[in-house]
Amino acid sequence: MTASRDRTNEFQSVVQLMRGRLSNGAASGAAASASEQHSQVKARLHQRSQFNQLARRVGADLKSTCAKVEKLALLAKRQSLFDDRVPEIQELTYIVRQDLNALNQAIGSLQEVSRNGQSQFQQQQQQQSRTHSNSVVLALQTQLANMSDRFRNVLETRTETLKQNAARREQFSATSSTVDLLAKPSLLAQDDELHRTSSDVAIDMSGAEANWRRQQQALLDQNEDYLNSRADTMRNIEQTMVDLGQIFQQLATIVREQDEMVQRIDASVDQTTINVEGAHAELLKFFKTVSSNRRLMLKVFGVLIVFFVLFVVFLS
Amino acid sequence: MRLYSLQLVYKQDNRVTPLVAAHDLSSFGFFERKTAKEFMDFTGKLIVERSAPDSGRSQVPEQSYICHCFVRNDKLAGICISDSEYPARVAQSLLSQVLIDVYTCSQAQFKQLEAELARYQDPKKADTLSKVQGDVNDTKAIMTQTMENLLDRGEKLDDLVARSDALSAQSKAFYETAKRTRRCCNAL
């Protein structure tokens, strides 16, 4: 009996630890009436567990976003000429961007939590846990930085591939290529793809969230797409009408210029008619003169012959 | 570019009751028609069941068809199944139009739905926007042709001006020659 040690204190501290781990903020009645050290320990543990859970969540999100970035990289690399999955890539890019922003904010809040939690207590006892939480936050931040670097590289490769594709398309086909905007991403197909290709560790939470987010985005996009396409068509029609107006105006100008040319032609042709008529009259007169000369000649010749005969008769 | 079916359903919580439906099954073989019709009805019902009540417009591609779905705020929903070439905007405006018409005529809905489906088979003629756009484009093409003709006319007019000028010069020369001939060669 005397060999037994009094380990009540140890037992109580272990109980506090377990209670702090199990129940986050459930302040039991016993904790309120416990000694100050116990309440301190419990609050500290509460802070620690909150920090741990937040860090765990952030880590899980980070991993899922990492997987998405990898998938995006794969898609961007394997762009062939005809198998263009543009809408998927765009959506994935959008989602990854949002995830990165959320992760940034989450890591910021994690830092806040770790800083707030430790400012209330004595410093020398918190040294190790503070360094631990700092190193955790640092690790998460470096992972986030790496992932955003990879994301940026993926975007750059994608723009490169797009440029190459456009160049090759122009080379092989004479007509300009138009992006097929009719194939909108569908919700069910996206669901299937997510479940097929996702390799996340935490599938439930972050996968469902991303899926719901994507669905909402896709729905909004489709609603907007309908209205946008109507607006585009209207704009096209308006532009065409403006063009038509300009064409009509040019038509009027050109017709007026040509009117002047027509009048010149008219004047020339009239002049020609006059000239030809005049020439015709001259020739007629000439002809008349020529033909009438004979008559005159006859008359003159007759008179000459009479004179000649008289002269001969007179002489002889 | 075809429409295959047009359905109106009433979506209440998670149950979907089909109201009216019209089909155009002329492109299927005679023995496939019944299964195709059932399949289309079932797909439409399923899609409306799975969409959220305020999801508005959506499109679900499936094999080579696309299901356009429009869920309105007052629990009425319309589904239009078309092939992949049919423009999505026209299908969505068809659904809006049909859902608006539902309130106006309640008795002869079925016949009207068939008529609408038949009318929208050619999206260029039925949809107002497409029609206007088509007309305006045609007019623009005709006007471009007219402009080209006008420019040709301009060229020909230029040619005519030159020739008539030459003609008038030659006729003047002719006149002078005739006058001279009359004056000079009189004593021949």
Image (cartoon, coloured by chain):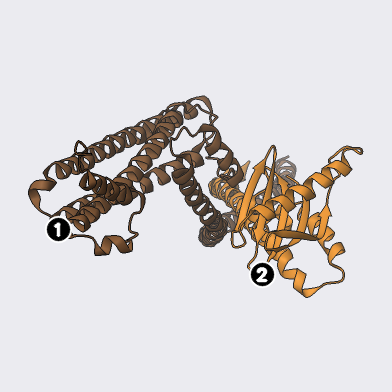
Chain colours: A brown, B orange
Q: Residue furthest bottom?
A: B104
* Residue under label 1: A120
Which residue: 27% across, 50% down? A16
Q: Residues within 10 Å of mark 1 (few under 14, many from 20)?
A: few
Q: Is residue A199 left or right of residue A57?
A: right
Q: Position of residue A250 (x, y in %)?
A: 51, 58
Q: Amino acid at mark 1?
A: Gln
Q: Position of residue B161 (x, y in %)?
A: 55, 50
Disc 1 is placed on an element classified as: loop
Q: Amino acid at mark 2?
A: Asp
| Marks 2 & 1 on one chain | no
Q: Position of residue A61 (x, y in %)?
A: 37, 42
Residues A231 and B51: in front is: B51
Residues A92 and A12: in front is: A12
Which residue: 23% across, 56% down? A43
Q: Classify B148 as above or below A177.
A: below
Q: Position of residue A19 (x, y in %)?
A: 32, 51
* Residue under label 2: B74
Q: Chain of mark 1?
A: A
Q: Is residue A109 visible?
A: no
Q: Classify A238 as above or below A179.
A: below
